[in-house]
């Protein structure tokens, strides 16, 4: 009888550990030695929804203090890619981490994707959480949304950090990536994301809409010169999709810009060298 009780205890202990491990979310192309202890992007203790026009947008809030809004990258992007930032910010700031429409637990909606639409999504979340002006941190697709957000709502954006988002216009770069290609590149990540998505059957629609958005959008002088807040524009010096030259060009159009280039880093500079990225951000926020 005693041996059976011990065996049952071991089994339950093992299964609880398995469930805990399954809850650990991963970011795209996450190294095997990285473990995200908090399921950012699927944390019921911190998560909520807001209705933003035609879609329910999911977000999570951590900590207290000056609000800082996190806008993750597109397609391969997710809230959990910001684990290091959330861990560092949440002791001193109120972190508002948004899952972009069509990503994670946010709906895709019925209208075509645009930067204006996603800026309004972010503002719907901001208004649901705080009446204060906010700091915004955006990466790649989230960086472009951040540019638009600051231009549309200058009174609500106090400071901004943008990573991996350079000048873009139709014909400069062709966006034609498909969901099938993405899933072949990182199967575990996409299996996880499809389970989170409220409409996993629309994954190909998401990729098509993102491609249509960026094949037709212009982010250049007219938009960037309208940004009134201080902006730290960052990039990895080996970013193939957003070369340093286009990132610097974008920054030059912003009246109050600073530029930080992370050496020996690609598109996700903060994922490849978080310490260097953080060392650039801290003095910018303190100033």
Image (tube, rainbow, N blue to C red):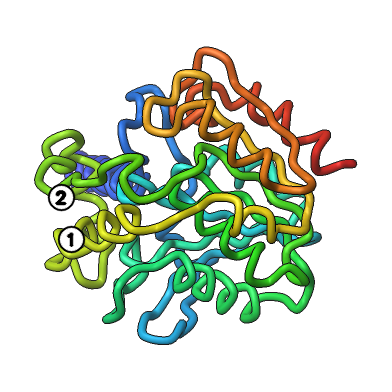
Q: Quadrant of residue 257?
A: top right
The residue drawn where x is 39% and y is 22% is: 33
The answer to which of 101 and 141 lies nearer the viewer is 141
Q: Are marks 1 and 2 in contact (CB under 8 Å)?
A: yes
- According to the image, label 1 marks what residue? 203
Task: Tell me the distance, in whole angstroms, between the alpha carbons under discs 1 and 2.
Answer: 7 Å
> Which is more N-terminal, label 2 or label 1?
2
* Observer able to see residue 5: no
Secondary structure beneath dot 1 equals helix
* Observer able to see residue 41: yes
Residue 162 placement (x, y as % from top left)? 60, 44
Label drawn at residue 36:
none
The reply, left or right, for residue 256 in relation to residue 52 is right
**Label 2: how many residues lie within 10 Å, few (<14), some (14-19) or many (20+)?**
some
Q: Quadrant of residue 149?
A: bottom right
> Quick one: which residue is furthest to the top in this view?
264
Secondary structure beneath dot 2 equals helix
The residue drawn where x is 56% and y is 79% is: 124
The residue drawn where x is 46% and y is 68% is: 118
**Label 1: how many residues lie within 10 Å, few (<14), some (14-19) or many (20+)?**
many
The residue drawn where x is 52% and y is 42% is: 83
In the depicted structure, whether residue 224 falls above or below residue 172? below
Q: Quadrant of the C terminus?
A: top right
The reply, left or right, for residue 260 in relation to residue 79 is right
- According to the image, label 2 marks what residue? 179
Residue 125 placement (x, y as % from top left)? 57, 74
In the depicted structure, whether residue 157 falls above or below residue 126? above
> Quick one: which residue is furthest to the right in this view?
287
Residue 73 placement (x, y as % from top left)? 43, 48
The reply, left or right, for residue 162 in relation to residue 229 is left
């Amino acid at each position: 009888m005693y041996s059976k009780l011990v065996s049952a205890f071991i089994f339950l202990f093992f299964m609880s550990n398995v469930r805990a491990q399954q809850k650990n979310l991963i970011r795209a192309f996450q190294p095997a030695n990285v473990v995200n202890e908090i399921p950012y992007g699927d944390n019921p203790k911190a998560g909520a929804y807001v209705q933003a026009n035609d879609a329910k947008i999911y977000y999570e809030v951590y900590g207290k203090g000056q609000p800082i809004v996190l806008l993750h990258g597109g397609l391969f992007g997710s809230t959990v890619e910001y684990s290091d930032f959330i861990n560092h910010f949440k002791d001193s700031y109120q972190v508002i981490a948004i899952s972009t429409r069509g990503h994670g637990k946010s709906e895709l909606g019925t209208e075509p994707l645009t930067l204006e639409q996603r800026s309004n999504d972010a503002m719907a979340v901001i208004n649901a959480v705080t009446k204060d002006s906010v700091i915004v941190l955006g990466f790649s697709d989230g960086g472009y949304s951040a540019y638009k957000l600051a231009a549309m709502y200058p009174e609500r954006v106090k400071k901004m950090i943008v990573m991996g988002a350079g000048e873009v216009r139709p014909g400069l770069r062709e966006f034609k990536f498909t969901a099938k290609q993405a899933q072949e590149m990182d199967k575990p990540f996409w299996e996880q994301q499809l389970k989170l998505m409220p409409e996993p059957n629309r994954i190909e629609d998401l990729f098509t809409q993102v491609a249509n958005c960026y094949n037709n959008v212009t982010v250049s002088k007219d938009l960037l010169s309208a940004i009134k807040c201080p902006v730290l524009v960052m990039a990895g010096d080996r970013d193939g999709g957003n070369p340093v030259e286009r990132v610097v060009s974008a920054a030059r159009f912003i009246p109050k810009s600073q530029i930080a280039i992370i050496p020996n880093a690609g598109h996700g500079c903060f994922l490849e060298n978080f310490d260097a990225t953080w060392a650039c951000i801290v003095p910018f926020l303190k100033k």
